[in-house]
Each structure stands twice: as C-alpha cells, then as structure tokens.
Image (cartoon, grey):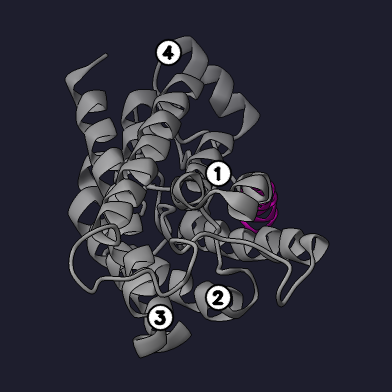
C-alpha cells in the first residue's frame, strides 16, 4: 500500500467517524431540542467542514455510496474502492461506539432517539417506501457530487454545494426514515441499537448503492465526454490520457489538458467531497 493511499484511508476512517459522532450525535443528544431542521444542518455543516479539510487528502467520500459513484465514473480503481469501503464502515462503527459510550454512563446524557440515531421504517413509512426514498435521495446527492467535482465545475465551491445538498436531503428524509444516503452511517448505529434497526439495516445499505449507480447514469447522460474512442486508444498506447476523465464538458473555448491516468484518478478524489 502506497503512503498516499494509507493517508487517504486514515482520512476516510476519521471523516466517517466524525460524521457519525457529530451529525448523528446531534440527533442522539438533541433531536428534542434542535429538531429535524437542526439535525439536517448538523449533517450538512459537518460534511461541509470535512470536505474542505479532508478533500485534498482522500476526496472526503466518507460514504460507500459516494465511493461507488466515483468507482463507476472511473475516478478510482476497484482495489482503492474496496479499501475505502473498509475504512468507511470501520469509521462508522467507531463513531457509533463513541455515541454509545457517551449515552451509557456520563451523567444525564441520554439517547433522545431511542435507537442511537439509527435508520428504520414502519412508523411513518413502509419498507418499500423507505427503499424508494433512499434510492431517490442518494441519487440526488451523488449526482450533485459528481457534477460539481467535474473539471467544468466552478473551482472552490464543491464543498458548499455538497454540504447544502446533504442538508436538503435530510430535511426530506429525517421525518420519514431518519435519512441514510450513507451505508456506513447506517450500519454503525444499527449494530449498537440492535432490534429492528439491525434487522432492517440491509435496506439502508443496499438502497443508497442503487441510488449512486443511477446517479452515474444520469451524469453520463447529462455531460459530454471529451475523451473520444480514438483518444482512449491513443492514451492506452502512449500511457497519457487527454481530455476530461470525469466526463464533464469543459466551458466553451477551454481546451482539455493532458494528464496521466494516475493524476486523473487523484484529481477526481481530491476535488470531491
């Protein structure tokens, strides 16, 4: 494992753990005080901060669904994606463990959600409805990420757009199923909550992955790849890729720059989340 990949995995572990501890923690410790709106903004603001802090290191995916989207968009290798998933799920479990510790014996700290902020269905939405909801919300979230981190996007504003989008999808989903759009965020709390939360967690792992895959299809349909088949054959022969590996079209008048395949993958990770 290269030092750069090791640093990326450490960043993904830390970022996912912080997202769960801080954002899910806002629900666990304060859902009755700040309400759904406050929790939604907690998720958005935490991701906004982490995007700018960890983005240059790992791309700040901190979400297996986002990593799947980047993988399918050819922004990273399958091996890198697997390593990212391991780090993210481990981080989600670590963050949930800290929340469990905080609500287990520190004075009056109690779990106001009753299930450590885990996702579930049954009270306000059916299982089928929750699946459709998570697919749609993740579809929107990952599509925005892929579009705002393309080479044609406005530099410097990706983190803001991503954080606000996460806030928006939580405003919709929190009253219905608690909002996942992130399998690692769902698995960690469910492991400690047990019961129906753990029995139903498969939906909150599978549905976001489906939504991410659909988002890649949308991005491919909306954007015009600048790498033609001829250019791809040339790149394979020479080892140098030309054009935009993200598939996003550059503004009129701008010419694609030459980048190596390794630089292209690093660009896709470092500019996202």
The spot of residue 228 in percent (x, y) is: 61, 34
For residue 6, above or below residue 138? above
Query: What whole-number distance in Å separates the C-alpha atoms at marks 2 and 3?
Result: 11 Å
Q: CA distance from mark 1 to mark 3?
A: 31 Å
Whole-angstrom CA distance, mark 2 to mark 1, is: 23 Å
**Residue 100 on the magenta segment:** no
- Residue 154 makes an appearance in the image: no
User: Label 2: how many residues lie within 10 Å, few (<14), some (14-19) or many (20+)?
Assistant: some
Q: Would residue 153 appear left or right of 182 to someone viewing this image?
A: left
Specify whether residue 208 is painted magenta: yes
Secondary element at tag 2: helix
Tag 1 secondary structure: helix
Q: Residues within 10 Å of mark 3 (few under 14, many from 20)?
A: some
Front-lying residue, 245 or 52: 52
Q: Position of residue 248 (x, y in %)?
A: 52, 52
Report if the CB atoms under discs 2 and 4 are less than 8 Å apart. Answer: no
Residue at point 47%, 58% (across, down): 145
Q: Which residues are magenta?
A: 207-223
N-term mark: 1 or 3: 3
Quadrant containing the N terminus is: top left
**Residue 257, which numbered label?**
none
Q: Mark 4 or mark 1: which is in front? A: 1
């Amino acid at each position: 494992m290269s030092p750069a990949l090791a640093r990326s995995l450490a960043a993904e572990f830390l970022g996912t753990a912080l997202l769960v501890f801080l954002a899910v923690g806002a629900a666990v410790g304060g859902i009755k005080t700040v309400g759904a709106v406050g929790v939604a903004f907690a998720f958005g603001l935490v991701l906004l901060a982490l995007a700018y802090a960890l983005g240059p290191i790992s791309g700040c995916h901190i979400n297996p669904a986002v990593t799947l989207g980047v993988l399918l968009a050819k922004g990273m290798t399958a091996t890198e994606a697997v390593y990212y998933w391991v780090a993210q799920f481990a981080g989600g479990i670590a963050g949930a463990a800290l929340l469990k510790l905080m609500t287990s014996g520190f004075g009056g700290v109690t779990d106001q959600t009753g299930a450590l902020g885990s996702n579930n269905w049954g009270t306000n939405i059916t299982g089928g409805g929750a699946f459709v909801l998570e697919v749609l919300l993740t579809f929107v979230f990952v599509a925005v990420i892929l579009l705002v981190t393309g080479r044609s996007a406005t530099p410097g504003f990706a983190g803001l757009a991503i954080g606000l989008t996460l806030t928006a999808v939580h405003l919709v989903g929190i009253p219905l199923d608690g909002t996942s759009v992130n399998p690692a965020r769902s698995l960690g709390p469910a492991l400690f909550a047990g019961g129906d939360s753990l029995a139903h967690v498969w939906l909150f792992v599978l549905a976001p992955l489906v939504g991410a895959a659909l988002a890649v299809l949308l991005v491919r349909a909306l954007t015009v790849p600048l790498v033609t088949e001829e250019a791809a054959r040339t790149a394979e022969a020479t080892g140098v890729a030309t054009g935009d590996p993200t598939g996003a079209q550059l503004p009129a008048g701008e010419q694609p720059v030459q980048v190596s395949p390794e630089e292209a993958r690093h660009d896709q990770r470092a500019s996202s989340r």
